[in-house]
Amino acid sequence: MFKDFKMKINTTYFLDFKIYNDNINKVLNPNKTIINTINPHSFCKTLDDKVFKKALTRSHILLADGYGVVLASKLLY
């Protein structure tokens, strides 16, 4: 969903998820923006719940909720 934004934004990856890593004011716009968060618990839920995983991956903005996701993304990528 990040492709909807015309400006360059910083992102990082956490397995199948593209996580926003920049100033939130860069991407807020008057149109609808879907913002979700991912944390270790929600990640584990995506392993069993494909609908939930689809909802997270289709978010315009996916924010890391907690240091666990941030650390894992740094270690993996």
Image (cartoon, rainbow, N blue to C red):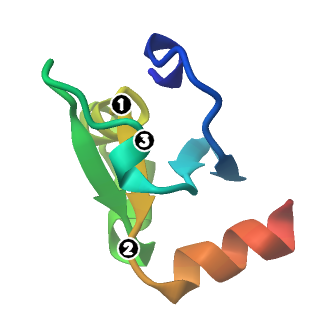
Answer whether labels 3 and 2 touch (C-beta < 8 Å): no
Disc nearer the start of the sequence (3/2): 3
Secondary structure, mark 2, is loop
Label 2 sits on what residue type? Asp
Quarter of the image with the C terminus is bottom right
CA gap between label 1 and label 2 equals 16 Å
- In screen coordinates, is 21 left or right of 23? right
Q: Nearer the viewer, residue 44 or 69?
A: 69
* Residue at x-position 34% and y-position 48%: 25
Res 26 label = 3
Quarter of the image with the N terminus is top left
Label 1 sits on what residue type? His
* Residue at x-position 42% and y-position 41%: 26
- In screen coordinates, is 70 left or right of 64? right
Q: How many marks?
A: 3
Q: Where, by quadrant of the figure, is residue 28 drawn?
A: top left
x then y, percent, for residue 20? 52, 50
Look at the picture and state if 55 lies above or below 47: above
CA gap between label 3 and label 1 equals 13 Å
